[in-house]
Image (spheres, rainbow, N blue to C red):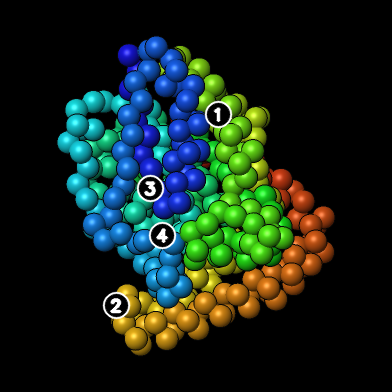
Amino acid sequence: MKNVLVIYYTQSGQLLEIAQNVAQELENSTNVSVSYHQIKPVEEYGFPWKADKFYDVFPESFLQIPCTLEEPNPEIFTKKYDLVILAYQVWYLTPSVPINSFLKSESAKKIVKDTPVVTLIACRNMWIKAQEKMKHLLIENQANLVGNIALVDRNLNHVSVITIEKWMMNGKKEKYLGVFPKPGVSQKDIDESVKFGKPILESLNKNDFTSLQDNLVSIGAVVVKPFLISMDKRANVIFDKWSNFIIKKGKPGEPKRLKWVRVFDKYLKFAIWFFGPVLFIVFLLTYLPFIGKIKKDKKYYASVKLKGISNT
């Protein structure tokens, strides 16, 4: 009997629905036992979000400062898992605070050490650098990343900026004003995520995950957009400066800090709406001269490799 553990943190429930679909093929197998572990912060972040709270988590999120979690059910430590599916959200270009906190805990080390891990991401559109951070966290836990699935909001960038924020603030995954498309991963993509279970099950049964990521990519598990690589890298540089600045202004919720959190909120919107289009034009103008590097980056970020680390 193969033991599989699905670890997840979700607020809206979207990520759990996707994780259950991905695991469906495994659960239907007679020789696989699937368990679930929901990560629970001691102090919940709340959903829908309050605007100040939504932006006030930015410094700790980006700087990967852990929060306190509830202790896992002791039962999950009684098995050695043949595979872990780690489902996570992206907060500010970084694995969410609860997921980051779990991976920095002793519990994570006990569970994922020397264990194959498939990461499962559901986010707006930028996950590249978050996954690089995830790779480092898994290596620190001596886990073996064997696969990655990234499902995104397929709507235009500036459209999803509006719709995702409305969803986060009102908690309703619906058409804003009756005109905008629904936010988040489309229901079609959620329903079709069942297909990713087949190659995972095949690798699990063979106890050989060497070709899993290639098989997942071939059926659309990961789509790497070159412009978003560039945006993600630039945004990380900016976020590094802002997060280190804001965190020095006080603890979460303190008035002096909230003043700068609100400034960051306005700056972020300005950057998305005005700097974004400029960067896209620059990207188009430099596309051909850098086509070789762009192709190399696409291949790398679609893989489970980490630069400078041997994956043998």
Residue that protrudes farthest toward the front in the picture: 178
Question: Looking at the image, is mark 3 or mark 1 earlier in the sequence?
Answer: 3
Q: Nearer the viewer, residue 194 or 229?
A: 194
Question: Looking at the image, is mark 1 or mark 2 earlier in the sequence?
Answer: 1
Label pair 2/3, CB-CB below 8 angstroms:
no
Which label lies toward us, 4 or 1? 4
Question: Looking at the image, is mark 3 or mark 4 earlier in the sequence?
Answer: 3
Which amino acid type corresponds to the residue marked 2 in the rendered image? Lys
Q: Secondary structure at mark 2?
A: loop
Q: Which residue is mark 2?
A: 251
Which amino acid type corresponds to the residue marked 1 in the rendered image? Val
Disc 4 versus disc 1: distance between alpha carbons?
26 Å
Which label lies toward us, 1 or 2? 1
Q: Is residue 291 at least partly visible in the picture?
A: yes
Q: Is residue 247 left or right of residue 92?
A: left
Tell me which residue sits at (44%, 21%) in the image: 26
Tell me which residue sits at (82%, 55%) in the image: 288
Which label lies toward us, 3 or 4? 4
Which label lies toward us, 2 or 4? 4
Q: Secondary structure at mark 3?
A: loop
Give the x, y percent position of residue 139: 37, 43
Q: Secondary structure at mark 4?
A: loop
Give the x, y percent position of residue 208: 46, 19
Q: Which residue is mark 3?
A: 9
Label pair 4/1, CB-CB below 8 angstroms:
no
Image disc number at residue 194: 1
**Measured along the vertical axis of the image, is residue 231 above or below residue 220?**
below
Image disc number at residue 47: 4
Disc 2 versus disc 4: distance between alpha carbons?
21 Å
Using a 10 Å C-alpha cutoff, classify the residue at mark 1 as few (fewer than 14 neighbours), some (14 to 19) or many (20 or more).
some
Which quarter shows the N terminus?
Answer: top left
Question: Looking at the image, is mark 2 or mark 3 earlier in the sequence?
Answer: 3
